[in-house]
Amino acid sequence: MGKANSKHTPMRRCNGCMKSFPKKELLRLVVADDKVVVDPGGKTEGRGAYLCRSEDCLSKALKKKRFTNVMTRKLTEDEAEAVKAAIGVAEGRSEVSE
């Protein structure tokens, strides 16, 4: 009588496009030791934000200051470059301003 065999899939919202996806499909960013770092395993302690693995979503999130709202701090240019590298975007392809 129900969904005894179905597993719950945790959903998270991308801070760029604001669409919901299964948690495993998104990249988690977390504030650790006063730095924003990529959390590939999704288990690092701290305030986290999720992002699609696309340059467009990163650009939207930075432009609309969504990381500042979620993490209560800005991403530095170095941190933004680390996120770009993690999502597979070629370094130096676009400028990040925030």
Image: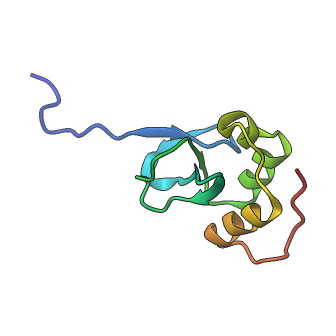
Q: Residue at x 17, y 30 (%)?
A: 3
Left or right: where does residue 53 sit relative to residue 96? Answer: left
* Left/right of residue 18 with respect to residue 27 in the rendered view: right
The x, y position of residue 59, in whole percent, is 80, 53
Image quadrant in which you'd find residue 37 = bottom right
> Which residue is depicted at the point 65% across and 51% down?
34
Q: Position of residue 68 (x, y in %)?
A: 75, 39
Could you say where residue 82 lies in the image, as x and y percent from the top left?
69, 68
Residue 14 position in % (x across, y down): 61, 43
- In the current view of this chain or complex, which residue is farthest to the top? 1
Quarter of the image with the N terminus in it: top left
Q: Residue furthest front?
A: 33
**Snapshot colouring:** rainbow
Q: Nearer the viewer, residue 49 or 13?
A: 49
Decide which of 16, 96 is in the foreground and name it.
96
In the depicted view, which residue is nearer to us: 97 or 71? 71
Q: Is residue 22 above or below residue 96?
A: above
